[in-house]
Amino acid sequence: MKVTFPHMGYTYIPIKALLEKIGLEIIIPPRSSKRTLNLGTQNSPEYACLPLKINMGNFIEAAELGADTIVMAGGVGPCRFGYYAQIQREILHDLGFNFEVIVLEPPDTNYTELVKKINCLTDSWWKVISGLSLAYYKACAIDRTEKKVQQVRAREVSKGSSDKIFEEAIWKIDKTSVKKEIKEIVATALQKLNKVETDPLRRIIKVVIVGEIYTVLEPFVNFEIEKMLGSLGVEVTRSIYLSQWINDHLFYGMLPGESSKKYIKLSSPHLNSFVGGHGRETVASSVSYAQQGYDGVIQLAPFTCMPEIVAHSVLPLVSKEHGMPIMSIYLDEQSGEAGIRTRVEAFVDLLGRKKMTGGVNCEVLLGY
Amino acid sequence: MTVKVGIPRGLMYYYYYPLWKEYFTNLGAEVITSPKTNKAILDMGVKSALDETCLPVKLFYGHVIWLKDKVDYVFIPRLISVERKEYICPKFMGLPDMIKANINNLPGVIDTTLDMSKSTNNKLKFAREIGLIFSSNPWVIAKAWRKATAKQKEYEELLVNKKMFPQEAMDYLEQKNNRILKVNNYKYKIALLGHGYNIYEEYISMNIINKLKERGVSVHTVDLLEAEEINNEAAKLPKRMFWTFGRKSIGGAGFYINNKVDGIIHIASFGCGPDSLVGEIIVRQTRKNSDIPLLSLTIDEHTGEAGVVTRLEAFLDMLSRRVAL
């Protein structure tokens, strides 16, 4: 059994740690690329959302490397993600790839379904627990480093120096499976990042990226928007970090550390119901970061994403109420880097002007 | 003075209007329904809704705008789920919030939540919450709800037993004389799949049902099927479908494939999330289990009538050639 799984940003590191720990032979698909996107788009339903298409590309590329089993998450609605695996399995079979697909999702009738699925992956539950623990530890380590990088990136004098340190740390975290070593790697990386030469006079703008998890976490589909913003002197924060997502969805927010449970209520009165996906989190975190004094919000979503469309519809209210500009960007296989860059640069210019004048004559920005 | 409640002619109107109208009337309110869609209503909706929303939601916006100055309340329920363990669509879950954010000067909004995903008894809670807006007397509320559900049952029986389409059945219930185009010597039997608020909405579907009837087609839709006929087929899916319309479309498609219709037409709105995957399943299912031709139409506010007619005629020509062979 050669197991593969779809890509989403740096998630491959914790997932790899988990699956290796429970004793599986794994094949990581090549990082998502233009080729992945083309393969996926050719073989997916036309109106399906972008993550489904790129996942398809990942699976086809993994099959070329010899993978025969897919492990992926699922769901029970109302977001389309819950039905991804079913469609993808059908398409892959038609293409002649006879994948075994194991979908880890909340069971329909009772928990023995899920237990059976996990049992066919491993013989020991202890391995699962220690694997999960290591995976969560790695996710936290990556997030801690990345948060520091997001701060330094906006201020560094020679562009790219913080990213170099970050990539090195990521590579090292991926290689080791000893928690103590991971701790040291993070400490060294943070130390190095502190030493990066920064420009103390630079006017820093703070922007939060909210939206659908895949487009927020996967640099390939959002054209490395974080680096793009960082090079414009913008300190970026995301509403979704991997460790927080694991905490929310696998442990129901019970672990210490960040969880969206703390701020989800802030979406009221603008959005009073959960709407699937990350729709409610998008609204709630926009409010939360507005209260923390951020200058602007960028919402990212795949084209036709239902929960994000609902969120986008109510965001103008948040923008008006808090005097904070919000820009929504939809991404699909037609998106081009130049178009996104132009919009991002214009948005940052406007934020800079607003900050400089103290918000005078900037109502024109709000509510759109 | 009686309270005026506006019911927009859109989205779930085609499924629950008799229930809602009867309920509000028996609670002592006057019900005002927005008129049949025209260009002005659609344009108002398209202007105020977000570009990315789908056509039926934009149209619903238009109907709400038409109603807003004429009533004391508009009825925009938050329909999370109308069947156990199923959802309709995220946009239905956020609909009242979206409308309140995008339309100014709204009258009162009845945005009661209906969530039957965990228990179907939640519909009583839904009914009570609405009832309490109009009356504090539980007996009045209970009686009104009983009458309303009886009316709804009558309506649903007209669909399933008499094979009437929703608007025909509603007109029949209100004893309006509406000339129904009858097809006696039909040439083909075609299954028309899609969400009710698209296929029965005469303006945005370009009156496709009548267009087909005029060309000698007997039209069949899943809403006229018995629940078991749909569910037996939907149960064959490897994973339970969690969208109500998706389950109906797929189950209905399976039923019609077994019953050897001459063709299948699937209508989806541009950007419809569930249908992007459901449509794919239907296409595969049809191809695998039969040789029935299938036509997929995607509609949005730019769809031109001539384009739809051309595709329909080409499809029907193709059917006639198949029959001749």
Image (cartoon, coloured by chain):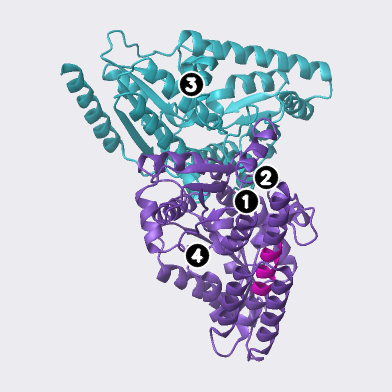
Please tell me whether mark 4 or mark 2 is closer to you in this view: 4
Q: Do the residues labelled 3 and 1 touch (CB within 8 Å)?
A: no
The image position of residue A258, as x and y in percent, is: 75, 61
Question: Tag 4, which secondary structure?
Answer: loop
* Mark before the other along the chain sequence, 1 or 4: 4
Residue identifier under label 2: A274
**Which chain, by letter, is purple?**
A
Q: What is the distance, in whole Å, between disc 1 and disc 4 at their CAs?
A: 18 Å
Secondary structure of the residue carrying numbered label 3: helix
User: Along the line of sight, which residue is nearer the eye, A363 or B228?
Assistant: B228
**B102 with respect to B3 (left or right):** left
Mark 4 is surrounded, within 10 Å at the Cα level, by few (under 14), some (14 to 19) or many (20 or more) other residues, namely many
Residue B174 seen in the current view? no
Compared with residue A174, is residue A98 higher up or lower down, i.e. above or below?
Answer: above
Name the residue: 46% across, 47% down: A68
Given contact means CB atoms under 8 Å apart, are the residues at marks 1 and 4 in contact? Answer: no
Q: Say which chain is cyan.
A: B
Looking at the rendered structure, the kind of residue marked 1 is Gly
CB under 8 Å between callouts 1 and 2? yes
Q: How far apart are marks 1 and 2 (CA)?
A: 7 Å
- Three-letter amino acid code at disc 2? Phe
Which residues lie in the magenta part? A137-147
The residue identified by callout 3 is B233
